Image: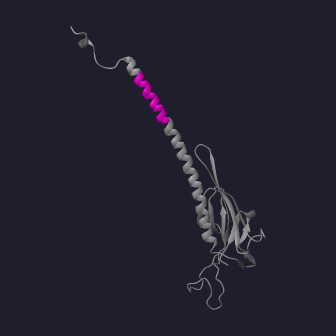
Amino acid sequence: MNPQKNRRSGFTLVEMAIALGILVLLMASVFSITGETSKFLSDNDTETLVQLEGSRAFQRLIDLLRKSGRVTAGGVAYPRVTSGGAALEFRVLADLDGNGYAFDQDDGSLEWHPAVFTIKADASGNLDVTNGAGKVYALGRHIQNLNFQTIAENPALHFKEIQVSYEVRKTNGAGIEFVYPVSASVHMRN
């Protein structure tokens, strides 16, 4: 009898244990890399969201305030900073006589919308434009430390200038807070 023929082919218990150990090490490495990559992407997504929200809110704010201007109505001068700098009341130009322009063709005076609008952030960090108690337009989210200044609060500013500053703050799932500060000036129409 040939001793080679009696030998069975296959893996021994030692070979199986070694292969299983190698597989466990490879899987642990893959899970570790996957976890770190997921955390990095999550942090990156939160940081990108904060920056995007800050820039988008400021662009909307600029677009709106450039349609406003200095006007006195009912003995009140607009734009007017209220709530210790955390809110801005303003009026916008409007075509009131239907001639297609925001000024009276007879005397050349500007036509102002009769409503007074307010920009402010609520307790949840939503930056909105309101008209009385009603929300008119959403400007941004996650807004903190909002502050407005006009020439009345800061004489160094230009007559048509509104200084605005705020922070966009968001905390990711791991408890890390991301902050994007915004501070700039907007020049009104008149």
Residue 67 x/y as whole percent? 62, 75
Q: What stretch is highlighted in magenta?
A: 18-31
The image quarter containing residue 129 is bottom right
Q: Residue 178's x, y, as percent?
A: 63, 50
Against 84, residue 30 (above or below) is above
Answer whether residue 134 is visible to the viewer in this image. Answer: no
Q: Does the magenta stretch include residue 62?
A: no
In the displayed image of the protein, which residue is found farthest to the top? Answer: 1
Residue visible at 45% across and 28% down in the picture: 24
Question: Is 8 in front, or is 112?
Answer: 8
In the image, residue 170 lies at what x, y percent?
A: 61, 51
Q: Quadrant of the C terminus?
A: bottom right
Residue 163 vertical placement versus 22 (above, below): below
Residue at (25% x, 10% y) in the render: 3
Pick whichever, 129 or 175, lies toward us. 175
Rendered location of residue 57, percent (x, y): 60, 62
Left or right: 133 as drawn, with respect to 21: right
* Quadrant into which the N terminus falls: top left
The residue nearer to you, when weighing 52 against 146, is 52
Residue at left offset 51%, top offset 42%:
37
22 or 43, which is in the foreground? 22
Q: Principal SS element in the magenta part?
A: helix
- Residue at horizontal 28 percent and vertical 15 percent from the top: 8
Q: How many marks?
A: 0
> Is residue 24 one of those drawn in magenta?
yes
Is 51 situated above or below 129? above
Give the side of residue 67 with respect to residue 18, left or right: right
| Snapshot quadrant of residue 49 | bottom right
Residue 171 in sight: yes
